[in-house]
Each structure stands twice: as structure tokens, then as C-alpha cells.
Image: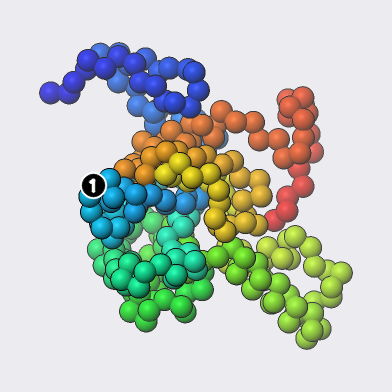
Amino acid sequence: MPDHRLTTFDLRLSTKKYYLCPNKRMDIKEAIDKARLPQHVAIIMDGNGRWAKEQGKLRVFGHQNGVAAVRDTVEGAVEIGIKYLTLYAFSTENWNRPRLEVSALMELLVNTINKETKTLMDNGVKLRAIGNLPQLPTKCYNRLHEAMEKTANNTNCTLTLALSYSARWEITEAARQLAQAVQSGRVRPEDIDETLFAQHLATKDIPDPELMIRTSGEQRISNYLLWQLAYAELYFTDKLWPAFRRQDLFEAIMAYQKRERRFGLTSEQLVKPQKKPFNKN
């Protein structure tokens, strides 16, 4: 039998409290305005090692348990209608971690892709990846591409894994491509603007994130989507990634919906009919 002794649920997003009726519990999901969902949510999944340490386990134990957080978060995103979800899974800097941990992470990636492809198919999730993917071990690279091909026609949500990824690497690659285009005469320097530059980024086929979530209490973006996060709302939670679940995602969405997104305008301008703000994409 469910325990209905709890009478007040504090969302910790504001001083407002949501009161729970003993016979009818208010779900956070029901309080979300579906008409004002962020189209794209990006997440920095941080805290696996600290979570494992709290359990008296090796760091790899935290990475293994982080898989359940990914699964539940993806399913939660599909449940409420988030169309794009990007997860920072492995940075270029992570290659500098102890060799044993990196090897375990790569093996975990292969096993997770093998096991979770069915979950992606069941939920209509399309898998894609960004980053310097050729750096991945051959087995990982092949399994990843097999899963992407298998899920290519899914339309409920696009899940992007940032693997061997660095935003500075991505921006440098875009600049190099444009420099080569100018050198070959395909592009004139005066034609280069934000729109053209964005078309050379790894995320050129998806919208920029409106919301970025980072777990574990750290408050930085760690070389993640530096260009794309220009107008994103940032949400930081103390919860360590292996403990993160869809309810935590919903709380972040609630916090996002309480914020005023002005794009350079004043609050007064937002309540008046305005021309559409400049779209950098």
C-alpha cells in the first residue's frame, strides 16, 4: 500500500510548495506546461566517481550505475515530449584518466549500446553522436554506428551522445573547414556569419539547447557546447548522476519554465507585440 503520510512536497525550485492530497498525489509531471517545453535539453552527467566513493566502491561502479540514470532520463524525456536530448558522455580530457578507468568506460559503452538499443527502439529514440569519434576503439565505434543505423528512422526523440568531445575542438574544426572553403574559392570571407559558421558545427542538424543541466553540484560547463549554449538556461543540482531520475529532469523543466527568457529584450518589451528576435541559426 502506498504511504500517504507525506503531506508537503518541496520542489526546491522556489519558495512555493505543492500540497499533496492524501488520496491524490500531485505529480511534478502534471504541473509542467507542455506548451512551453524546451525543445532541446543538454546534460553534463557528473558525479559517478563521487557516488561510487560514497558506496565504498571503485569509480567504475559509479559509471555502471549511471547507465540506469541515462535510461530513466531518456524515457522521461520521451514521456513529456522533449524532442532533443544531448548527454556529455566522454570528453577529450577524459582520455587522460587512469588507463584502467578509460578501458572500463569503453567496455561499458559497448555493453550499454548492445543492451539499450532495444530500449531506444521501444521508445522511438534516434541515436546520434558528436565528437572526434575515430578516436574511439574500433569495437566501440562499430557498435555505435550499428545502433545509429538501427534507430535512424525513430522520431519521438533524438538522443545525442557527446563522445571524445570538446567544444573547442568542434569550433576549431568548423574554423578549419571554413578556412579551407575560403582557400578553395567556395566561400568568400565576407560571407561568413553566425549562420554559416553554425552549419559547420557537429550539431548543425539539431537546434541549440534551451536548457543545460549539470549534476553533482559543480557550476561550470566544462568545454561543452560552448557555441550552442549561448542562450541556454543553466540548471545545477547537487544530486550525483547515478541517483538522477526522470523526476529530477521534471524539476529542472519546472525551474526552466519559471525563468524569463528575454534574448536581449527588456521585461516590458516581452509583454508587447514584438518582431521576432534575430535568429542566429
- Graded by Cα atoms within 10 Å as few (under 14), some (14 to 19) or many (20 or more), the crowding at tag 1 reads few
Q: Residue 218: percent from the left, percent from the top? A: 49, 45
Disc 1 marks which residue?
55
Q: Which residue ends up furthest to the bottom in the rendered image?
A: 184
Residue 211 visible here:
yes
Quadrant of res 274: top right
Count numbered badges in the picture.
Answer: 1
Q: Say if 253 sits above or below 202 in the image.
A: above
Residue occupying the far right of the picture: 190
State left or right for residue 136 relative to residue 224: left
Residue lying at 69% horizontally and 77% vertically, measured from the top left: 177
| Residue at the image position 30 percent from the left and 20 percent from the top | 25
Secondary structure at numbered mark 1: loop
Q: Is residue 76 left or right of residue 222?
A: left
Q: Amino acid at mark 1?
A: Gln
Q: On the picture, is 115 further left or further right than 169?
A: left
- Residue at screen point 49% across, 66% down: 93
**Residue 76: percent from the left, percent from the top?**
37, 43
- Residue occupying image coordinates x 29% and y 68%: 104
Q: How is the image coloured?
A: rainbow
The answer to which of 278 and 108 lies nearer the viewer is: 108
Q: Nearer the viewer, residue 263 or 51?
A: 51
